[in-house]
Image (spheres, helix red, strand yellow):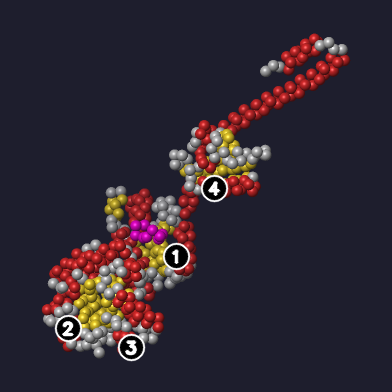
């Protein structure tokens, strides 16, 4: 660029060539000088702008923050290298793109909608955004956006990668709420979860259990093998404890060798005792640490909400107290805080132990309750009902041991034994002149889920020689509705064996007629709860009447159970119910008494 001095020389030379008087030449020279001064100032300002621009460009390229300028719609016009590095995009592909299109995170659209709304309202926005790069990597960024001062609405975007800060925050938070040695929740997190669990249990009218566990003689491990071995033992203990609870439960380490288990939504106190016993059993297995085989035991105290307390502090104190009772009782056991519950649980555990040997000890009996056909009043079948006769203790209520057998899985061998006895006894009655007498046997939910149920029934019929058409298997609505498609397959396989199928307790469960017509049923059994007040309660009467009419339309036999008086019988006869069973005709009888009843030819009048 030519200098001002060159321009001045050229202009002076031009003035000399003009034929002007001295005053006019002087006037033009003043104008020329003024113009040259303006040009010099402009040149200096332009140079200064160039320097500022180069400086700004250097600043933008050297800063660690990503900077971009976009138009009012968010289409990028320029950006620095840091912006491309942070977002994972090349510079030559960024310009002209909408900024929100560079973020592949699933929430990007909604986030940028909020940003532009804030810009319309206030002209600025700042906040945390999760960004997903083209390679799939996600990170946290702090994004600030502001409108420039000009009237064109341009936007300046400044972003910073804060992943390291977030990771540090998460790590600090994790360490604040978790035990550094085992990774389990610590006392602080347990306290928070316990408070929430108490509030939830109160709202839903549920129980929860707190198990306080202290390892027995743990100090000997530290003293004998060192603290490093003790730490290994605590980590392995934590792993075993977590394997004995459900996902929704919590195992926490309070410190030292003390652990707490929080069990949510339990139905009965016995469940907490079952978990405690599982824990003791799993800890009894040897620990192998640094070439040493160790055996460990624990003392566990159990307390229940709301039975023993309604706040976290009380429950923790009670569980701790119960744990010390367990230690005082010889260690390697558990105690409940409430003595009454402790006695109840101990009785349950004693029953569970006795139940496992009851079949081998021949303590079970089968009683038979007659089913009576209403048209002629004669006995056409019997229902097999199991009874447990304990030596020196007498009969145990089915309501007490059947749920226990179901919980422990013992119902499967018990049910198989009952089926065998019922088929064998019915075949014996046939051989003694009672041809065609049918026997009904209840299937438990666990039995119905067994993969070998159908082969087991077929083998039992084969061994006993009973005609399959004289065996009726009873299932409940809840059992078959739990997994409809699988239930249909099982029922159809049983049906192909030739056995009869009955829907027990009908009306108490789902009563889904769409599925009912898909099940290969022969009989519906009206639940005793409807029969009980059928003569005095119009609602129960309507339900029973509807079931009978529906059964007739589906060509199913219908049986009413729990018939105890003449009023009930009269109602059922008027509605042409097929069969009844109940104390009005006979209680469940031992096999010899049932045979005598059959031999007497007794009929319902």
Marked residue nearer the N-terminal end (3 or 2): 3
* Residue 380 shown left or right of residue 108 in the figure: left
Q: CA distance from mark 2 to mark 4?
A: 81 Å
Q: Which residue is the site of mark 3?
A: 567
Q: CA distance from mark 3 to mark 1?
A: 56 Å
Q: Which residue is the site of mark 1?
A: 316
Q: Main secondary structure of the magenta part?
A: loop
Marked residue nearer the N-terminal end (1 or 2): 1
Element class at badge 2: helix
Instruction: Give the residue drawn at x 48%, y 43%.
Output: 104
Q: Which portion, as a residue range, is magenta?
A: 242-250
List x then y, in percent, for residue 575: 32, 83
Nearer to us in this view, 545 or 224: 545
Quarter where residue 504 is shown: bottom left
Q: CA distance from mark 3 to mark 2?
A: 28 Å
* Residue 216 shown left or right of residue 307 in the figure: left
Element class at badge 3: helix
Element class at badge 1: helix
Q: Which residue is the site of mark 2?
A: 595
Marked residue nearer the N-terminal end (4 or 3): 4
Marked residue nearer the N-terminal end (3 or 1): 1
Q: CA distance from mark 1 to mark 2?
A: 60 Å
Query: Any mark on residue 336, and which?
Result: none
Q: Which residue is the site of mark 4?
A: 111
Element class at badge 4: helix
Q: Which of the two marks, 4 or 3, is nearer to us in this view?
A: 3
Classify the position of the N terminus by image quarter. Answer: top right
Please say if 530 is above or below 296: below
Please say if 89 is above or below 185: above
């Amino acid at each position: 660029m030519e200098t001002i001095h060159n321009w001045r020389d050229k202009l002076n030379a031009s003035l000399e060539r003009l034929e002007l008087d001295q005053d006019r030449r002087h006037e033009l020279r003043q104008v020329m000088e003024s113009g040259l001064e303006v040009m010099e100032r402009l040149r200096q300002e332009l140079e200064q702008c160039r320097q500022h621009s180069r400086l700004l460009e250097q600043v933008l390229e050297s800063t660690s923050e990503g900077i971009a300028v976009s138009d009012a719609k968010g289409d990028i016009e320029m950006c620095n290298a840091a912006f491309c590095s942070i977002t994972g995009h090349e510079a030559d592909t960024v310009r002209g793109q909408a900024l929100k299109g560079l973020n592949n995170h699933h929430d990007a659209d909604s986030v940028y909608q909020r940003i532009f709304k804030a810009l319309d309202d206030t002209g600025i926005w700042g906040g945390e955004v999760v960004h997903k790069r083209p390679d799939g990597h996600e990170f946290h960024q702090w994004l600030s956006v502001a409108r420039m001062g000009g009237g064109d609405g341009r936007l300046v975007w400044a972003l910073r990668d804060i992943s390291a800060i977030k990771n540090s925050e998460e790590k600090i938070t994790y360490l604040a709420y978790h035990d550094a040695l085992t990774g389990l929740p610590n006392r602080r997190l347990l306290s928070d979860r316990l408070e929430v669990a108490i509030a939830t249990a109160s709202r839903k009218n549920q129980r929860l259990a707190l198990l306080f566990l202290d390892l027995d003689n743990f100090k000997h491990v530290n003293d004998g093998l060192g603290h490093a071995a003790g730490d290994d033992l605590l980590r392995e203990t934590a792993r075993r404890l977590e394997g004995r609870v459900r996902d929704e439960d919590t195992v926490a380490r309070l410190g030292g060798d003390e652990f707490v288990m929080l069990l949510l939504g339990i139905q009965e106190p016995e469940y907490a005792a079952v978990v405690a016993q599982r824990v003791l059993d799993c800890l009894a297995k040897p620990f192998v640490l640094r070439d040493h085989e160790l055996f460990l035991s624990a003392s566990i105290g159990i307390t229940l909400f709301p039975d023993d307390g309604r706040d976290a502090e009380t429950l923790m104190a009670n569980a701790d107290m119960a744990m010390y009772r367990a230690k005082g009782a010889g260690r390697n056991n558990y105690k409940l805080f409430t003595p009454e519950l402790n006695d109840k649980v101990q009785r349950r555990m004693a029953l569970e132990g006795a139940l496992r040997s009851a079949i081998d000890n021949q303590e079970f009996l089968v009683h038979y309750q007659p089913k009576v056909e209403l048209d002629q009043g004669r006995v056409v079948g019997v229902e097999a009902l199991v009874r447990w006769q304990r030596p020196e203790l007498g009969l145990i209520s089915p309501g007490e041991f059947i749920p226990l057998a179901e919980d422990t899985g013992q119902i499967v061998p018990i049910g198989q034994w009952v089926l065998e006895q019922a088929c064998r006894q019915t075949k014996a009655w046939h051989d003694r002149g009672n041809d065609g007498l049918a026997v009904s046997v209840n299937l438990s939910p666990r039995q119905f889920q067994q993969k070998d149920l159908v082969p087991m029934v077929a083998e039992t019929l084969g061994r006993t020689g009973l005609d399959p058409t004289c065996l009726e298997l009873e299932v409940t609505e809840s059992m078959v509705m739990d997994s409809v498609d699988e239930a249909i397959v099982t029922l159809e396989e049983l049906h192909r064996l030739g056995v009869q199928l009955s829907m027990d307790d009908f009306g108490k469960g789902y009563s889904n007629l769409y599925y009912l017509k898909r099940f290969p049923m022969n009989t519906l059994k009206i639940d005793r709860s409807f029969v009980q007040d059928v003569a005095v309660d119009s609602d129960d009467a309507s339900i029973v009447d509807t079931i009978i009419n529906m059964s007739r339309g589906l060509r199913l036999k219908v049986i009413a159970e729990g018939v105890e008086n003449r009023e009930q019988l009269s109602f059922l006869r008027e509605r042409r119910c097929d069969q009844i069973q109940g104390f009005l005709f006979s209680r469940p009888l031992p096999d010899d008494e049932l045979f005598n009843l059959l031999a007497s030819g007794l009929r319902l009048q």
